[in-house]
Every structure is written in structure tokens, then in C-alpha cells.
Amino acid sequence: MRARYKPWALDFLKENEKFVKLNPSDWKNKWQTAFENDHPIHLEIGTGKGQFLMGMAKQFPNTNFIGIEVVESILVSAVQKAVETTPENVCFINEDAKDLRTMFEDNEIDKIYLNFSDPWPKARHAKRRLTHETFLEQYKQVLKKNGEVVLKTDNRQLFDYSVESFSQFGMKIEEVLLDLHEIEDPTNVMTEYEEKFSSKGQPIYRCRAQF
Ligand code: SAM
């Protein structure tokens, strides 16, 4: 996802601490306190401009949603959406997801979404894929027992790699869809990339896998 460099982005994130946790490690094991309830916590990694997270938060008001996005100039678009609609169940983290264990305690998260993650097609970059086993180790730790990872992508290579990676890690593959929009799923919330690719007629792949 590309975004124009916004020199004001960091200041904007700092000004909106209701929605942005700038020191997420301070909230480790206290995320329910941040939301002031004991509802389940779902995490989206690479949340981009936040359309999915905001749509999910509206559809599921009794779930808390946290979006992690490493690029601050992109995250500002997500935070702007939250500032406009003031949801009680959304917050954002401006960090790289490689350090999830510094931000979340074991068993603190109920579900993880990976939406249109960067495919990193070159073999030498495989470790950067968000479904590489080094990431799966982290997910397993921060997720509750039987926690679920849900992946959506337009990229067949990343999809095949990810399903295999889940399987090799010993996860239970619960769903493999090769054309998500062919089925009726009223709970599906489209991401920005999903809208872009499906409008061009490209199939969207979805996999749900459980530890
Ligand atoms: N999820 C959005 C969607 O489906 O429209 C955005 C998809 S975009 C291709 C991938 C996003 O993930 C980018 O905004 C990128 O900056 C972010 N990202 C990639 N690797 C990340 C990481 N390790 N930690 C946090 N964000 C990451």
C-alpha cells in the first residue's frame, strides 16, 4: 500500500491517543483495561487505511479490534476514520508486527486477521511473509488456546505458501476458499485491497486456520 509521505503524521497520531497506543508495551496484559470491558480482542496485522477494522468494529460492537500498521503515513487514514466515527471498540498501534510479544501477553488475543499481506515473492524474503513460521510462533503464543488466524489475499502464491505453512506448523485448516465472493457471507467486510482487486474480477482467496 502506497501513501504520500506526511510529515505531520506522527504528531497526528500523538494527538489522537484515544485511538492510538504509541507505547503498546505499556498495555501488555492490560488491553481489556484500555477498552474498559472484558470483550474478546481481535487483531489485524497490516491494517492499512483501516476500512476492514472499522467495518468489523461496527458489525461486532461486543468485540474489541486492534489494528497494527507499520507505516505511519498510511495509519493516519485509519485513525482519521476513527476520529470521525468515535467507535468505543477500536484502537491502533504504529509498529512492526515482528515484535508482537512485546505488546501482548500470552493468550491475550482471540483472533488474528491477515488481509492482503505483502507477498514477498522472492524466496530469500520468505521470512518476511506474515505467515512464515517465525510469525506463526508469535501468533500461537499471544492467541488463546484454539485461537484462529484468518487470511485473505488476491495472491495465489502467498495463499498456497500460507496454507502449507499453517499445515506444517500443525494448525487445523478450517476453511480454504478459492473464490470468497462466490459464496454468501454476510459477515465479510471488504478491505481496500479486496475492493480494488475484486472490482477487476480477480478471485479473493480466504483461509481460516486454528492452533
Ligand atoms: N490490509 C489492507 C487491505 O487489505 O487493504 C492493506 C494491505 S497492504 C498490501 C499491506 C499493509 O501491511 C501495508 O499497509 C503495510 O505497511 C502493512 N505491513 C506490512 N508488513 C507489516 C508488519 N510487519 N507490521 C505491520 N504492518 C505491516
Image (tube, rainbow, N blue to C red):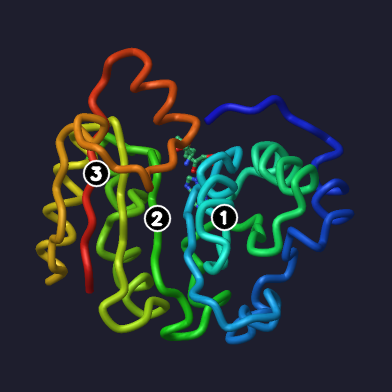
196 shown above or below 205: above
Q: Quadrant of residue 144?
A: bottom left
Location of the C terminus by quadrant is bottom left
Verify CB contact (< 8 Å) between mark 2 and mark 3.
no
Q: Quadrant of residue 190?
A: top left
* Nearer the observer, 68 or 207: 207
Residue positioned most to the top: 200
Determine whether, in the image, residue 81 is placed left or right of residue 159: right
Cα–Cα gap, marks 1 and 3 = 20 Å
Q: Position of residue 73 (x, y in %)?
A: 70, 37
Q: Nearer the viewer, mark 1 or mark 3?
A: 1
Return the mark for residue 113.
2
Disc 3 marks a residue whose amino acid type is: Arg
Return the mark for residue 57.
1
Cα–Cα gap, marks 2 and 1 = 13 Å
- Of the numbered discs 2 and 3, the one sitting upstream in the chain is 2
Residue at point 31% right, 61% down? 149
* Nearer the observer, 83 or 43: 83
Residue at point 37% right, 72% down? 138
How many callouts does the rendering have? Answer: 3
Cα–Cα gap, marks 2 and 3 = 11 Å
Disc 1 marks a residue whose amino acid type is: Ala
Q: Nearer the viewer, mark 2 or mark 1?
A: 1
27 shown above or below 167: below
Q: Quadrant of residue 136?
A: bottom left
Return the mark for residue 85.
none
